[in-house]
Image (spheres, rainbow, N blue to C red):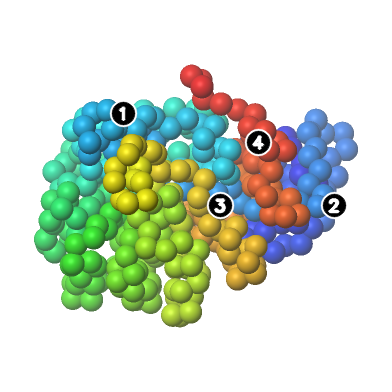
């Protein structure tokens, strides 16, 4: 058991200074003065620190990605400490362009490995293409029978996609929604958006013409271009959740996209950040010439959120929704992204300058005063 004392709690709404009692990886009690006399319990003093829910990253290539410049351009698997050190306590892994050399079975194995090493990990079945890359026979069966699978990933408006038609996407969405119903999950179709002229046209047809529920449709990389982001704003105003990538695929700084969307009337509750971490990116010189390879970073979700807070554009209680309660809502994870009795005991602690200094995952102290205390088995 663990007792957190005297922290300023953002759940994400401000609860003021509170104590939080944790047991079995869950929040057992929240109060102003929790007494544990006679109980075998560790105590952590959070005085002077802000405590938020643990950060959620719903788009990371945990088994690696890349490969557009041959086998040697493939990125390696992610290490546990790379995620924990930047406050990510819940991750969703997925495949990218490559559904041949990258295996959905290996993705599942990596997700389970991260889970056993100390964090919460989930996955999307599928990849860029329409051809079935699943653990079982269909995406629907994956969602029903495999606890780790929250939905399916596919690409549209990209030359690497399968150019799915309205009917093909509708049938896939039907399988995902029904799979979610049977498996007691939300079930979402996570859509990679490329840079073709069609932009989000097909998604508007799915919602407006075919009347498919918008809550099951989850577009990402919406900040790739200004024109695409303007369409994403329209999608959010229809009630959809839009995902802004912080590690790649951006026409401007992601926090500036958030400010622009807010100015256009999009509620903060309809936006999320994700990193696209571990994607394979080109290094370019000042003239745009290729000079090498790099991995998309993992730490930009909090960096961009912090820009909103430090600049005074948003209070902590609103800004952290982008990486806590909003992605949890999008994914249908009721015990993640919030601080409440019964929720999972995942927290991030900030100092008086809003620097990330402590992280708790599954009720355990995993980053202490900036030092990462746990690592993966082979780090």
Closer to us: mark 4 or mark 1? 4
The residue that appears at 46% across and 61% down in the rendered structure is: 254
- Residue annotated with mark 4: 367
Closer to us: mark 4 or mark 2? 4
CA–CA distance in space, label 2 to label 3: 30 Å
CA–CA distance in space, label 2 to label 1: 46 Å
Q: Position of residue 371 (x, y in %)?
A: 67, 33
Closer to us: mark 2 or mark 1? 1
The residue that appears at 30% across and 68% down in the rendered structure is: 228
Q: Kindly indicate whether the residue at mark 4 contacts the one at mark 3 (C-beta within 8 angstroms).
A: no
The crowding category of the residue bearing disc 1, from other C-alpha atoms within 10 Å (few below 14, some 14 to 19, many at least 20), is few
In the rendered view, would you say 312 is above or below 17? below
Front-most of residues 267 and 297: 297
The crowding category of the residue bearing disc 3, from other C-alpha atoms within 10 Å (few below 14, some 14 to 19, many at least 20), is many
In the rendered view, would you say 378 is above or below 276? above
Q: Position of residue 278 (x, y in %)?
A: 39, 39
CA–CA distance in space, label 4 to label 2: 25 Å
- Residue annotated with mark 1: 106
CA–CA distance in space, label 4 to label 1: 28 Å
Sequence order check, earlier mark of 3 and 4: 3
């Amino acid at each position: 058991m663990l007792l957190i004392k005297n922290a300023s709690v953002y759940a994400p709404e401000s609860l003021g200074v509170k104590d939080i009692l944790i047991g079995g990886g869950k929040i057992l009690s929240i109060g102003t003065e929790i007494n544990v006399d006679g109980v075998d319990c560790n105590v952590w003093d959070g005085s002077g620190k802000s405590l938020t829910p643990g950060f959620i990253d719903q788009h990371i290539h945990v088994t690696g990605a890349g490969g557009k410049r041959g086998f040697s351009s493939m990125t390696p698997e992610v290490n546990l400490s790379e995620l924990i050190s930047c406050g990510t306590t819940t991750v969703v892994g997925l495949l990218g362009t490559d559904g041949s050399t990258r295996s959905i079975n290996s993705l599942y194995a990596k997700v389970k490995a991260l889970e056993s090493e100390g964090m919460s990990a989930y996955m999307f079945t599928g990849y860029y293409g329409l051809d079935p890359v699943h653990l079982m026979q269909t995406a629907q069966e994956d969602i029903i029978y495999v606890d780790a699978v929250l939905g399916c990933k596919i690409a549209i408006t990209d030359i690497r996609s399968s150019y799915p038609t309205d009917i093909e996407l509708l049938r896939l969405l039907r399988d995902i929604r029904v799979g979610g119903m049977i498996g007691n999950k939300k079930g979402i179709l996570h859509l990679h958006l490329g840079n073709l002229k069609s932009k989000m046209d097909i998604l508007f047809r799915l919602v407006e013409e075919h009347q498919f529920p918008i809550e099951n449709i989850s577009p990402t990389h919406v900040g790739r271009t200004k024109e695409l982001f303007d369409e994403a704003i329209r999608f959010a105003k229809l009630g959809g959740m839009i995902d802004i990538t912080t590690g790649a695929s951006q026409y401007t700084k992601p926090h500036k996209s958030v400010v622009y969307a807010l100015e256009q009337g999009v509620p903060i509750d309809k936006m999320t950040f994700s990193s696209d971490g571990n994607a394979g990116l080109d290094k370019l010189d000042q003239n745009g010439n290729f000079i090498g390879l790099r991995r998309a970073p993992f730490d930009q979700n909090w960096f961009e959120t912090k820009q909103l807070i430090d600049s005074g554009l948003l209070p902590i209680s609103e800004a952290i929704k982008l990486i806590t309660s909003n992605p949890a809502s999008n994914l249908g994870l009721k015990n993640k992204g919030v601080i409440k009795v019964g929720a999972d005991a995942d927290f991030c602690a900030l100092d008086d300058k809003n620097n990330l200094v402590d992280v708790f995952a599954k009720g355990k102290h995993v980053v202490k005063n900036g030092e990462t205390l746990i690592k993966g088995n082979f780090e």
